[in-house]
Structure formats: structure tokens, C-alpha cells
Amino acid sequence: MPERLNVDQPLWDQGSFIGRFKHFLWVTDPRTCVVSEDELDQAKTLVEQYRVGKEPPGTTLEQVIYAKKLYESAFHPDSGEKQNVFGRMSFQVPGGMAVTGAMLQFYRTAPAVVFWQWVNQSFNALVNFTNRNAKSPISTTQLGVAYVSATASAMITALGCKSYWQKNAGPFIQRYVPFAAVAAANCVNIPLMRQTELLYGIDLADVNGNQVGQSRLAAVKGISQVIISRIVMCAPGMLILPVIMERLEKYPWMQKIQPLHAPIQVMFVGCFLIFMVPIACGLFPQRCSLKTS
């Protein structure tokens, strides 16, 4: 009799970075975003049936693995609720490439900087809310404060850098205004969005999965790792792409197709994000150990 798959465990070893990279490359597949609601619900049902050994007769291992992929890409790991499609990690590539590409293209005027930073922080807030720790509920007021604070910090950083660099640096350096704003906003947005965890701690479990208490230190460690991974996720695209575009825009053929510069940047960002989303998600283990002392 073939060995049954443990649907609650990743298919790859999570003790190594390569294993985590493979897992997140699999689970953040952008193609899962266009799967119908009915198919997602059927995947969840099959996973739940398989978990208790009551799947329909004739179900193949390939069907179970695909259902597991859809389930993990679309449903919250804590609550089991279906996530908003725009807030799923599998939407990071299409959503991130559109917003980041626009930020990198439209950085020359203050209104454009403000608008695209607002769009980006709205997208980030949705992602952070969708992927929050479901065991640490956050009030509408706290959500509003987190959103306004992150958006304000992004705009202040972007406009401050733009104003300073306009006077003290060349046009090339000004291309880095969006990255400076995004990095600053992540440092504000994520802790505020998950402030309940910082105030009350997150659940700790022993090796057998039994809850043994709560820890604010664990929350600080986890949230710090999320901030680092989010900055790493966007860094290559936002740091390397300005160099590429600066070189390309000097060519006569590139100057003739200026309306296409924004779509070109969007496509470039997508190429970076396809790999950077799983790399950033896999930087740190999903479950970490903490010394009891």
C-alpha cells in the first residue's frame, strides 16, 4: 500500500533554504490567481477529506498534490478562510510588477510620486492584512492608523528624497526615490499592521504542537524577518532596473518608443519578482525555535 501524503506538511524539507525556495515557488505560482472560486472550494474539500482518509475512490496522488497547492495558495493557514485574491502571496508577481513598474517609471513629478506611493501602500496594506496572524485580531481603528502612518511615511520619504536629491544629485540617483520610500514604509506598515502581536505576543508551541504560552520576543523576531523579506523581495528590481533603464534610454530606438517605457519596466519587474517572491519568502523558516530562557 503506497505511503499517504501528509497534507499539512510541505513537500520539500523546510530546514534548508533550497527546500523553502522550492515550496514558495510552488505555492506562490501566479497561475493559481485565475483559478475559479468553485475549483478552490473543491480543492479545500478534497484536502479536508484526504486529511481524514475519506477522499473519493480513485483519487490520485497528483490530484491531492494539486488540491494542496490551490488550498495553500488561496486559504489562510491559521483560519482556513479564503483570502482576497489581491492580498494572496500568489498575486505578488502580477500586482507587484504593475505597481513597482509604475513607481519606477513615474518618479519625475511630485504628484506622480504621491499617487503611486499611495497605490503601493494600499496594495501593501491589503497584503499585510490578508496574511496577518489570524490569532491576533486587529481593530478597524488600528488598521486605519497603520494604513495612514505607512502611506504618510512613504510619501514623506519619497518627497523628502526627491527634493534633496534634485538639489544635490543627478537624475540617475532620483530613480532610487521609490525604493527609499518603499523600504521606509515597510518599516512602519508591517509593525503597525501586526501591533497586536507586539503588544500581547504570539503563541508558542513545543515539539509536539502543544501550546505552551505566548511571547512578545517571538513576535518581534517574526515581524523583523517579515520586514527584511519584504525589502529583499523588491530590492533587486528597484535597485538594478534603474541602471538598466538609464543605459537603455540613451539608445535612439528606445527614445522613439517612450510610451512603451512603462510596460517595459513592468515586464522587467515581473522577471525579477518571479524569483524574488519565493526567495524572500524562503529566507527564514516559517517555524522558528526560541530559547526558553
Image (spheres, rainbow, N blue to C red):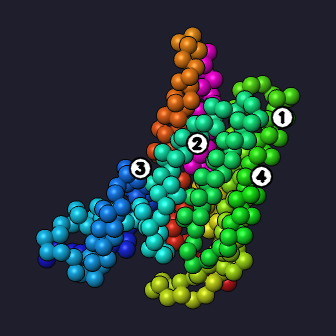
CA gap, disc 1 and disc 2: 22 Å
CA gap, disc 4 and disc 3: 30 Å
Say what secondary structure mark 2 lies in.
helix
The amino acid type of the residue labelled 1 equals: Ser
Whether residue 223 appears in magenta in the rendering, the answer is no
Q: Tell me if mark 3 has few (under 14), some (14-19) or many (20+) residues whose alpha carbon lies within 10 angstroms of its own.
A: many
CA gap, disc 2 and disc 4: 18 Å
Looking at the rendering, the stretch of residues picked out in magenta corresponds to: 231-250
Question: Which residue is label 4 attached to?
Answer: 152
The amino acid type of the residue labelled 2 equals: Val
Mark sitting on residue 163: 1
Q: Tell me if mark 2 has few (under 14), some (14-19) or many (20+) residues whose alpha carbon lies within 10 angstroms of its own.
A: some
- From where the camera sits, is residue 278 visible? no
Are the residues at dot 1 and dot 2 in contact (C-beta closer than 8 Å)? Answer: no
Q: Residue furthest top?
A: 252
Percent x, y of residue 227: 65, 58
Mark sitting on residue 30: 3
Percent x, y of residue 91: 47, 52
Closer to the chain start, of discs 2 and 3, is: 3
CA gap, disc 1 and disc 3: 37 Å
